[in-house]
Image (tube, rainbow, N blue to C red):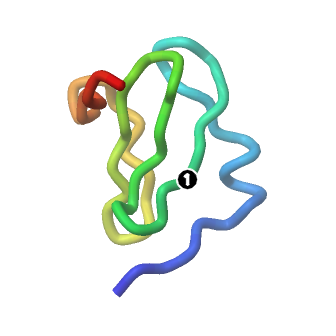
Amino acid sequence: MTSELDPRLLSALVCPLTKGPLTYDSAKQELVSQKARCAYPIRDGIPIMLPDQARPLEAP
């Protein structure tokens, strides 16, 4: 089951590495930082904003 992330929460969150914006990937349940080239998981509706839990993004 995928759930939507509250837009107010998304607007308040930033990448802990770059302090840049995040985009929500509902299919993968991740918050993506294009600047840091990583994706932070969302588990049980809770964003896990720890750099060591982030998944590196593939090269374009």
Instruction: Name the kind of residue labelled 1 in the image.
Output: Tyr
Residue 52 in which image quadrant: top left
Residue 33 locus on image (x, y percent): 50, 30
Relative placement, left or right, of 38 versus 6 is left
Relative placement, left or right, of 9 versus 55 is right
What residue do we see at 37% from left, 45% from top?
48
Q: Which residue is mark 1?
A: 24
Q: State the residue lying farthest toward the bottom.
A: 1
How many residues crowd around disc 1 within 10 Å: few (fewer than 14), some, or many (20 or more)?
some
Give the answer, above or below, for where 48 lies relative to 25. above
Counting every numbered tag in the picture gives 1
Q: Please state which of residues 41 and 37 is positioned toward the viewer in this rendering.
A: 37
Give the answer, above or below, for where 36 lies relative to 27. above
Relative placement, left or right, of 54 versus 49 is left
Residue 18 locus on image (x, y percent): 54, 12
Question: Callout 1: helix, strand or loop?
Answer: strand
What residue do we see at 66% from left, 30% from top?
21
